[in-house]
Amino acid sequence: MNLSLCSKAGLAATILTLSSLLLPLSGTAAEGDFSAGAMVWSENCGRCHNIRDPLDLRDDDWKTAIFHMRLRAGLTGQEARDVLAFLVASNKPARKSIIAAKASTSSGSGKLDGQAIYNKTCIACHGGNGKGLLPGVPDFTDPKGRLSQNDEVLIKHITEGFQTPGSPMAMPAKGGNADLMAGDVRAVLAYIRKQFGN
Amino acid sequence: MKHPGRLTRHALAVAMALALPMTASADVGYNELKKTVQQLQKQLQQVQQILKQQEAKVKEFEENTVTRAEAKALEGEINAASEWKDPNLIFHIAGYADVGYVDGGNGGNNKDGSFRVGGFAPIIHAQYKDLILLQTELEFQLNDDGSTKVGLGYMNINWFANDYVALGAGKFLSPIGQFRQNLHPSWINKLPSAPPGFGHDGAAPIYEVGLQARGGFPIGSLRSNYAVYVGNGPTLKMELEDGAFGLDGIDAEGIGADADGEKVWGGRFGILPVAGLEIGISAATGKATATLNETTGSTLSNQQARDYDVLGFDGVWKYRSLMLRGEYIESEVGRATTGSTASAGAKWETWYTQASYLVPSTKFEGVLRYTDYDSPHKSKDQQQWTLGLNYLFASNVIGKLAYESNDGMNGKPSDDDRWLFQMAYGF
């Protein structure tokens, strides 16, 4: 082994790292982004350990856990904020209050089309091809799979969250996106059926 | 009166003439009055109906509307909840623990099997805003004689300088390779045992005491991560055999005092070309000095600082339920030409490759690992196949059953095959 080479490499890496401290900070850090966080979460966390269920921890516990994981996994600050935004949005059990019930059963048509909702909320786990990116996530293209069930059942699962048998974690209510209205849920289901159904 | 009857008749006639139109007028008034009353009744019913509807609406409104007092009370609850959620200083406890059963190994002393407590490792985090994170892991282990060993796994204070750099100081997990820094906790490791060479006195450094910078940054559309450090480095253990000293092992578990004053530099760089794939390279270099005569247990001093170099490669690829990973690490110590322990150098080398597969729609996971560990001591050389079957009670609670087929020097623990069962819990 070339010792001087190693020494120089370590020294160079340290100097580069320390000099990055001199980079101007971006001022106010950007807020975490739900969709980006879902993607970072699904693409990174499972590389070392089983994916943890967002319901495992409450918001403040996730905050510290994510800062810990920022160190362990070498995430950027923005990636850490994105993952945190995803987790704190996804760890809410289906709400039972009158207001939430009204919102979830409202006939409101929502603002987004099904494809936009899928690409923002669902794609991180279900994948662009609908086959599922994570262990336990169902394959939408399977003719005898999840899409063989009727709309009423699937809308209930999307709205309230659902744990696939054998899966180590549950899909959060509305995929973690609490802003979705009943019309949005119907729209995304229609898109899923059109895109992946047989 | 001359014609009283006549007058009476005239008066009666006049009265009748007057009374006839009056009777007709009374009949008309009654009918109109009746009609009016009926209309009023109808209107009253309509009003009553409207009132009923309004009452229902008011009731619904009252049910779905909070009063000012209720809103204030709710605001108080939200503020109270926010106290838990958004303080400047957050304490958090995480960690892991495992228990199990081992049958075989340990030089034959365990051939009939023993229940084991693998360890209990609480991790405490104390975070100040988004700036500082103190993290420490304690290690509790139950010894064979029933006593308990307590150790400080790591303890470091980190400053998140910006989005790409976190500077830390203290005792930290060695960033060389992947297993020691990210995979060793029992709820993460997919088998009940560490690959040979990645445990104590192995080829892979475990802890370091010093300064470290860690983080990640994008390279175009690719992700990358890095860690660089400077630390005290390890110390060396010597053995006395046939009157001559030789290198026995490297103590790279985080040395609190630098015996030779020579620091060790090192780090790791990882890149993720595509999602699910990470490739890493690690290296460290510096000096290490003998401080312990392992044969007698006595300390050594004034020994010559030797060259110390580490090189490692690691990779992991995950596709849906399949995960493949591998890692290679070598630690090399140079020779010493002066001092009482002057002797030749030595090299420790190990690598493993592991495949795991979570059976779809089940909680069962199969694992296969092969490890080849070479040390300067033939009695410790080991080739190992490990086959495991896991059951995921939850993503952080795992039951593991594994069989180790070990090939080492005959009669040595490294040659004993083992059955292992472990329940691992990450919290």
Image (cartoon, coloured by chain):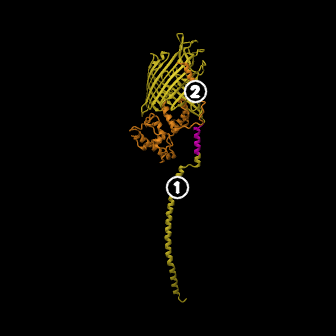
Chain colours: A orange, B yellow
Query: Between residues B334 and B103, which one lies in front from this camera angle?
Result: B334
Q: Separation of disc 2 and disc 1 at Cα?
A: 73 Å
Question: Which image quarter: residue B418?
Answer: top left
B15 or B205, which is in the foreground?
B205
Q: Which of label 2 and label 1 is nearer to you? A: 2
Where in the figure is residue A108, as x and y percent of width and height?
Answer: 48, 47
- B80 within the magenta span: yes
Residue assigned mark 1: B55
- Give left or right: position of A69 versus B104: right
Disc 2: CA contacts within 10 A as few (<14), some (14-19) or many (>=20): few
Q: Residue at x 52, y 58 (%)?
A: B51
Residue B319 position (above or below residue A195): above
Which residue lies most toward the top here? Answer: B243
Q: Is residue B379 visible?
A: yes
The image's mark for residue B364 is none
Quarter of the image for the N terminus of chain B: give it. bottom right
Residue A89 x, y percent position in the rendering = 52, 39
Secondary structure at badge 2 equals helix
Residue bounds of the magenta highlight: B73-87
Q: Are marks 2 and 1 on the same chain?
A: no
The picture places residue B13, in percent across and down from the top left corner, at 50, 82
**Residue receiving disc 2:** A16
The magenta stretch spans residue B145: no
The disc numbered 2 marks a residue on which chain?
A: A
Please say if the residues under marks 2 and 1 sit with CB atoms less than 8 Å apart.
no
Mark 1 residue element: helix
Q: Identify the residue at horizontal 53%, vertical 51% (top origin).
A: B61
Q: Hey, what amino acid is under mark 2?
A: Leu
Q: Measured from the top left, where is residue B224 in percent x and y?
A: 52, 29
Q: Main secondary structure of the magenta part?
A: helix
